[in-house]
Amino acid sequence: MLYSRIEGQGEPLLIVHGFLGMSDNWKSLGTQYANEGFQVHMLDLRNHGRSFHSDEFSYELMVSDVFEYCEFHKLKNISIIGHSMGGKVAMLLATTYPDLIKKLIVADIGPKYYAPHHQDILAGLNAVDFSIKPDRTQVEETLYPYIPDFGTRQFLMKNLYWKEPGQLDFRFNLKVFNEKIEKIGDALSEDLVFSKPTLFIRGGNSRYILDKDIPDIQKHFPNFNLATIPNVGHWLHAENPRLFLEETINFLKEQL
């Protein structure tokens, strides 16, 4: 069973993080959704955060994990927010189990194929040698040449934990990511359609959803709106949480 943080009472709202992320990334936004009257389930996907590790890793498996989670918690008529890789999980869940989903929000990812583009990040993570028992500062110094962007490094460093006294490790399953990295870019199958209300929300400075991608989005999600948060990149929910919350709450509270 997937690990989750659950907060609030009301209509169920699932939040699914992106590649190398975890539920902790959504803690403060999760609390704000709970304050708006939702029961918020912030998930850790397989091989991420505090959820189980597995040698198997694909969108189909991640969707089946989330579906089992919903069955276990008896969740129905769910709204779901997915960012990046989590957005692909949310799209596949909604198109596979449309009766389960009331509204779909996809943050800064489209249904198309994306070529592998995490090579520098993986190289940095693989360069960390935990056998020499580095501290957090030493881990960051190792990552720096590969990942000069401070925000990205901080995001990755959130995955560090004390496996035992004096021994740090990453929470995610780096071995599987090294082997299965090409899976992250998989496209949504051509024939899949979800016709209930859908919001795609992109960062104005991000290149993940381009104007030329809109016809492809419309084909899979005929009942969609596209919102753009100006002056932010791929981490739109972290860079402008106020506007992200405003756009998503307005959409979630619109009467069907």
Image (spheres, rainbow, N blue to C red):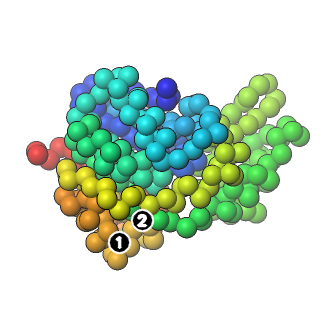
Identity of the residue drawn at 50% across and 36% down: 44
Mark 1 residue crowding within 10 angstroms, few (<14) / some (14–19) / many (20+): few
Q: Which residue is mark 2?
A: 112
Q: Name the residue: 36% across, 44% down.
A: 93
| Label ID, residue 187 | none
Amino acid type, label 2: Lys
242 relative position to 103: left or right: right
What is the x, y in percent for residue 219? 26, 65
Whether residues under marks 1 and 2 lie with C-beta atoms below 8 angstroms apart, the answer is yes
| SS at circle 1 | helix
Question: Hey, which residue is sitting farthest left in the picture?
Answer: 255
| Coordinates of residue 37 in the picture (x, y in percent) | 24, 32
- Name the residue rendered at 31%, 36% in the picture: 13
Is 167 situated above or below 91? above
* Disc 2 crowd, CA 10 A, few/some/many (<14, 14-19, 20+): some
Tell me which corner region of the image, top left, top right, bottom left or bottom right, holds residue 100.
top left
Is residue 196 among what the camera can see? yes
**CA separation in Å, label 1 and label 2:** 8 Å
SS under mark 2? loop
Q: Amino acid at mark 1?
A: Asp
Q: Nearer the viewer, residue 132 or 174?
A: 174
- Which residue was labeled with disc 1? 213
In-image side of 250 versus 159 (left or right): left
Instruction: Locate residue 24 relative to residue 179 in the image: left or right.
Output: left
Q: Which quadrant would residue 168 be assigned to in this image?
A: top right
Q: Position of residue 217 (x, y in %)?
A: 30, 65
Q: Earlier in the sequence, mark 1 or mark 2?
A: 2
The image quarter containing residue 224 is bottom left
- Name the spot of residue 155 as percent of width and height, x first: 59, 49
The residue at 25%/30% (across/down) is 76
Task: Please give left or right for residue 79 compared with residue 112 in the image.
Answer: left
